[in-house]
Image (cartoon, helix red, strand yellow):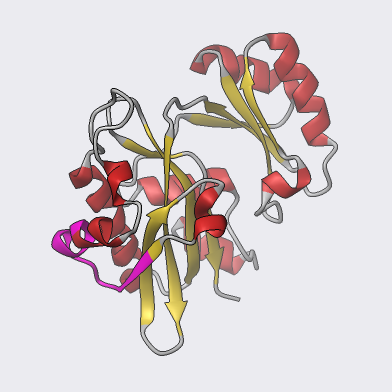
């Protein structure tokens, strides 16, 4: 039984972030280096293994929007900071564990996702991510399955397509790697009927132009 089937069998409405990224990585989506731990001691060991600075997040099936509950601590640079934030996050209702994650560098943020339309079925979404997703609403959709050529056209269709070009001395976004993420979402939509929705926001662009998902939600059919 795979991860999705186990979650549905257990009555879960969504995977936690760590599970979601493991699932997406299985389809070739690049995800941030991270470790799931139960407590502050585990968080310190994981942070030392990953290397400072790190991100610490509250993890739990019901914590789908961690920013709204203060469930994310960024740019932690020492054992003391990790322990302090671990205590705070573990006190958040619904927090079941801690996710220790590499602090990914990069100024550009994109969003990719999957939704199921009543009329068209699984549809893949791509656009400007981060805090600007809702503010600017610059996203495009394609009905799955999506080819690499479709994915490249989606990149050109957003109004802020220039963000994919060389930026502040950094190279252009690796469009082939980004296309593989978009194609993978379409594949999931066609093959995994129990997956209701996927939201990867943000997908950060590293200084070398490569994309990596640093946050992910996989919602399941009820």
Instruction: Say if 166 sits above or below 134 in the image.
Output: above
**Total count of labels:** 0
For the point 63% across and 66% down, the residue is: 13
In the image, what residue occupies the spot 25% across and 33% down?
166
Could you tell whether 198 is left or right of 55 in the image?
left
To which quarter of the image does residue 62 belong? bottom right
Question: In the image, is residue 57 above or below residue 43?
Answer: below
Q: Quadrant of residue 54?
A: top right
In front here: 172 or 103? 172
Q: Which residues are magenta?
A: 140-152
Residue at (23% x, 57% y) in the render: 156
| Residue nearer the viewer, 12 or 137 | 137
- Residue 119, quarter of the rendered image: bottom left
Image quadrant where one finds the C terminus: bottom right
Q: Residue furthest bottom?
A: 119
Above or below, 151 relative to 25? below
Q: Is residue 187 magenta?
A: no
Relative image position of residue 6 (x, y in whole percent): 54, 61
Q: Position of residue 79 (x, y in %)?
A: 69, 10
Closer to the camera in the image, 128 or 144: 128
Left or right, 56 with reference to 177: right
Residue 26 pos. (x, y %)? 35, 48
Residue 145 covered by magenta stretch = yes
Whole-percent x, y for residue 76 in the image: 64, 18
Residue 27 as seen in the image, left or right of residue 77? left
User: Nearest the camera: 130 or 186?
Assistant: 130
The quadrant the N terminus occupies is: bottom left
For the point 60% across and 50% down, the residue is: 16
């Amino acid at each position: 039984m795979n991860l999705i089937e186990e979650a549905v069998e257990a009555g879960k409405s969504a995977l936690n972030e760590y599970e979601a990224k493991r699932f997406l990585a299985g389809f070739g989506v690049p995800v941030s280096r991270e470790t799931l731990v139960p407590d502050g001691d585990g968080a310190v060991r994981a942070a030392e293994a990953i290397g400072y600075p790190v991100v610490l997040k509250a993890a739990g099936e019901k914590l789908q929007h961690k920013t709204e509950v203060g469930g994310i601590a960024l740019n932690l640079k020492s054992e003391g900071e990790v322990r302090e934030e671990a205590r705070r996050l573990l006190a958040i209702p619904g927090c079941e564990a801690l996710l220790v994650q590499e602090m990914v560098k990069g100024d550009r943020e994109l969003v990719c996702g999957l939704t199921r339309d009543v009329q068209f079925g699984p549809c893949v979404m791509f656009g400007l991510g981060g805090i600007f997703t809702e503010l600017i609403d610059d996203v495009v959709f394609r009905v799955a399955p999506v080819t690499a050529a479709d994915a490249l056209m989606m990149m050109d269709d957003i109004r802020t397509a220039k963000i994919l070009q060389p930026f502040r001395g950094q190279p252009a976004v690796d469009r082939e790697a980004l296309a593989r993420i978009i194609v993978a979402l379409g594949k999931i939509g066609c093959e995994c009927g129990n997956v209701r929705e996927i939201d990867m926001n943000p997908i950060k662009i590293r200084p070398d132009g490569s994309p990596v998902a640093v946050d992910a939600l996989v919602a399941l059919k009820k």
